[in-house]
Amino acid sequence: MVLELYLDLLSQPCRAIYIFAKKNNIPFQMHTVELRKGEHLSDAFAQVNPMKKVPAMKDGGFTLCESVAILLYLAHKYKVPDHWYPQDLQARARVDEYLAWQHTTLRRSCLRTLWHKMRQKRASDPITDGCEPPSGCWELNSVLLEDR
């Protein structure tokens, strides 16, 4: 049974999974779920992911959602080269640290900034005010990426 990926390539986490699978020659069948059309909210998609979010993955009878979990699953199952997800415990911990940080800090801020731009912010819109990344965000990114 072929691996199935449910993605909308407008979504950064979906693009990350797509690129990772392609670069590592992981065979998969792609199902496009168009967020702008609300396809992720359908009853049919809820059978794949009850949280009604992309990305999602089906591997036989096993389903998984959340981009980081899918990336790690693919890295383990397909034994990708060490530079993607190192075998060394401490090097892998650094990758895990960065994945957690970018998903909870950087990604959230970037998403808010994207919505801000898409809504063409009005002068005093409380929903989009303060959409800049948190102070120190870029400095922490540099610290996490430097060789320690």
Image (cartoon, grey):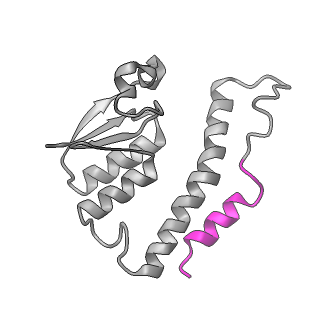
Residue 21 in the image: x percent, y percent? 28, 51
Q: Per the image, is 147 magenta? A: yes
| Residue 82 horizontal side relative to residue 119, left or right | left
The N terminus - image quarter: top left
Magenta stretch: residue 73 in it? no
Measured along the vertical axis of the image, is residue 30 above or below residue 95? above
Q: Quadrant of the C terminus?
A: bottom right
Q: Nearer the viewer, residue 45 or 120?
A: 45
The foreground one among 113 and 86 is 86
Name the residue: 54% across, 64% down.
98
Q: Check the image and name the residue furthest to the right.
A: 124
145, above or below 24, in the image = below
Q: Is residue 7 left or right of residue 118?
A: left
Magenta-colored span? 133-148
Q: Position of residue 42 (x, y in %)?
A: 41, 19
Residue visible at 63% across and 72% down in the picture: 143
Q: Position of residue 85 (x, y in %)?
A: 37, 68
Q: Quadrant of residue 14?
A: top left
Percent from the top left, x then y, of residue 58? Answer: 28, 41
* Residue at the image position 71 percent from the left and 49 percent from the top: 133
